Image (cartoon, helix red, strand yellow):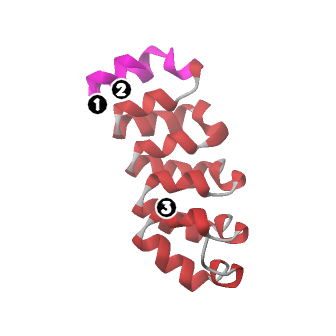
Amino acid sequence: CWASEKVRADREVVSLAVERCGGALAYASEQLRGDERVVRVAARQDAMALEYASWELRNDHELVLDIVERDGRGLKFAADLRDNDEIVNAAVRETGQALADASARLRQDKKVVLRAVREDGRALLF
């Protein structure tokens, strides 16, 4: 990474970067990857930015729910919440393909699968 540690730890710089490109969260300091406001901004731009958030935020129920309701693809990086009924149902309602990232238990739950298939018939692949 070309930016200095000081710049990658600057909230203003990182917030602007992730607002333009959510994946820029990968280059933020560890502290800012654990900052809920910065992660929310990144995930609004690209739900897949959740991959670069701290483990704690990847397990934050409210944050993850907010992300997957807007873009179910974020479920892929939701850590332990991939086995949470509410989180997974929200994700598959948004995109049936999120079923691929649900826990094995929820991929076998008929109600969850039906929600996913209603949204996208290809969810049967998972």
Q: Which mark is residue 77?
A: none
Secondary structure state at the residue bearing disc 1:
helix
| Dot 2 amino acid type | Arg
Q: Main secondary structure of the magenta part?
A: helix
Mark 2 sits on what residue? 115
Residue range (magenta) = 105-126
Mark 1 sits on what residue? 119
Mark 3 sits on what residue? 23
Q: CA distance from mark 3 to mark 1?
A: 26 Å
The relative height of residue 35 versus residue 125 in the rendered view (above or below) is: below
> Residue 50 appears at what percent x and percent y?
55, 53
CA neighbours of label 3 inside 10 A, class few (<14), some (14 to 19), many (20+): many
Q: Quadrant of residue 93?
A: top left
Identified at 56% across, 77% down, the residue is 14
Q: Quadrant of residue 27?
A: bottom right
Closer to the chain start, of discs 3 and 2, is 3
Q: CA distance from mark 1 to mark 2?
A: 6 Å
CA neighbours of label 2 inside 10 A, class few (<14), some (14 to 19), many (20+): many
> Residue 95 appears at what percent x and percent y?
35, 37
Q: Is residue 89 left or right of residue 80?
A: left
Identified at 48% across, 70% down, the residue is 18
- Residue extending farthest to the front is 2
CB atoms at circles 1 and 2 under 8 Å apart? yes
| Dot 3 amino acid type | Gly
The relative height of residue 28 versus residue 101 in the rendered view (above or below) is: below
Q: Is residue 112 magenta?
A: yes
CA neighbours of label 1 inside 10 A, class few (<14), some (14 to 19), many (20+): some
> Residue 15 appears at what percent x and percent y?
52, 77
Q: CA distance from mark 3 to mark 2?
A: 29 Å
